[in-house]
Amino acid sequence: MNIHLIKIYSLSKKIPIRKMAKDLGVSTTHIQNIIAKKGNPSPKLAKKIEEYTNGEVKAIDLLYPKDDRD
């Protein structure tokens, strides 16, 4: 099972996806789509997520998942 990095962060920090999305200024649906791999973050959003997570979720990993880099 491959759990998305954002979901892992959300669960480990006990931050609801809804709160994270609001803090980032995007819709909950957009974050859910990124987690479900039905959408991708823009470079700007990926950087915001990296900053929001204090570097625990890297922008490069969101923009270029390891599956795509192999």
Image (tube, rainbow, N blue to C red):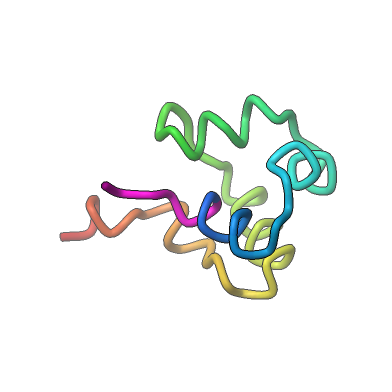
38, 11: nearer the viewer: 11
Q: Quadrant of residue 60?
A: bottom left
Horizontal relation, residue 52 to residue 69: left or right: right
Please report the bounds of the magenta region as a residue range: 1-6
Residue 57: x and y, percent?
55, 65
Q: Quadrant of residue 14?
A: bottom right
Query: Residue sitting at 28 percent across and 59 percent down?
Result: 66
Residue 4: x and y, percent?
43, 49
Horizontal relation, residue 69 to residue 28: left or right: left
Residue furthest out toward the bottom = 55
Residue 18: x and y, percent?
75, 36
As displayed, is residue 50 above or below residue 2? below
Horizontal relation, residue 62 to residue 53: left or right: left
Q: Main secondary structure of the magenta part?
A: loop
- Examine the structure image and report whether residue 28 is included in the region drawn in magenta: no
Query: Residue sitting at 23 percent across and 59 percent down?
Result: 69
As displayed, is residue 61 above or below residue 37? below
Residue 52: x and y, percent?
74, 63
49, 35: nearer the viewer: 35
Horizontal relation, residue 20 to residue 41: left or right: right
43, 57: nearer the viewer: 57
